[in-house]
Amino acid sequence: MAEHIIKAQNLSRYYQVSQGLMAEPRTLKALDGVSFSLDAGKTLAVVGESGCGKSTLGRLITLIEPPTGGNLWIHDSDISQAEKQQLSQVRKAVQIIFQDPYGSLNPRKKIGSILEEPLKINTSMTRAERMEKSYDLLEKVGLRKEHYTRYPHMFSGGQRQRIAIARALMLNPDIIVADEPTSALDVSIQAQVLNLMMELQETYNLAYLFISHGLSVVEHISDEVLVMYLGKTVEQGDKHQIFSQPQHPYTQALLASTPFVDPTKRRQRIVLKGELPSPLDPPSGCAFHRRCPKAELICSETTPELKPTANGVEVACHLV
Ligand code: SF4
């Protein structure tokens, strides 16, 4: 496991959900057997509708909650076997940026104090050293020294997300889980924040697990794409292959609903029927079959396995 910074094998997170006093608890498979690897300096985009399991995956990678099945290695640590001290090192190496730049910064604290909090908890740096590090990162994210003494409400959404990015970098992590980091921002600001993230990736050789509900946002930033549906991977592989030749009908539908400026990339819209089914009561066979425009009889009877295809991309569909 030396070459990958993250490796997940058959990673799962199930919850037991009780449905009243007399009823048997049921199993909700929020994440069901997802495998991938991520290298330093690279970006894996995890894409799917809300409820597909992508944020659960983000919580497992940031060790906010443990997996209930499969294996997860971060650096060389097998998370299920790691000692407490090793886990605390891993926690510092993996940081998260949340979607909502308004809710994620404490409104009662000044920016300097928000930035320095992780250093106070995790390091023995002096006040002067913490301040110097804060100034340095404020500058790296495109803000200024004088912002150190201001409060979050004095900043725009884009600036707040820059502050959240600076805070995530205070402990010199090498993995960032970015959970829809631009979806609460105006379109014009989204590109600026994405460009900043790409610059910082270059500077610090960061690995990004970039969670997104749509494909358009991840086109420039990602190296690999993992498309999820109801807790499982349906298509996974090289970004260029997936964008130029999507093979799973769900990926095709996601791409067809993606607005592209370049007219050669525009596709005929595919309207998906119905909503994402409840993960408590997933459809039989292929979980996508009730919404899939190409579904055949076998689709409702047998679950398709994720298999490699000719261009190296893995796809879970009976017709591919
Ligand atoms: Fe559609 Fe069948 Fe493929 Fe599932 S297995 S995506 S239902 S064609």
Image: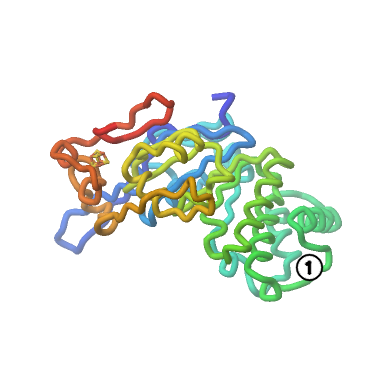
For numbered disc 1, what is the local secondary structure?
helix
In the image shown, does 249 or 222 lie closer to the viewer? 249
Point out the image quarter for the N terminus: top right
Q: Amino acid at mark 1?
A: His
Would the CB of label 1 be found within 8 Å of ligand 1? Answer: no
* Residue for point 62% across, 34% down: 40
In the image shown, does 241 or 51 lie closer to the viewer? 241
x%, y% of residue 54? 43, 49
* Residue for point 70% across, 48% down: 171
Instruction: Please state the quadrant of the image where ligand 1 appears.
Output: top left
Residue at the far right: name it.
Answer: 128
Determine whether 183 is above or below 294 in the image: below
x%, y% of residue 207? 61, 40
x%, y% of residue 306? 33, 32
Q: Which residue is mark 1?
A: 147
How many marks are shown on the rendered structure? 1
In the image shown, does 192 or 45 lie closer to the viewer? 192
Question: Quadrant of the rendered structure where residue 50 is?
Answer: bottom left
In the image shown, does 71 or 203 lie closer to the viewer? 203
Question: Quadrant of the rendered structure where residue 278 is?
Answer: bottom left
* Residue 191 seen from this side: yes
Determine whether 35 is above or below 118 in the image: above
* Residue for point 73% across, 65% down: 113
* Residue 53 seen from this side: no
x%, y% of residue 247? 36, 37
Determine whether 101 is above or below 298 in the image: below
Determine whether 254 is above or below 76 in the image: below
* Few, some or many residues within 10 Å of mark 1 (<14, 14–19, 20+): some
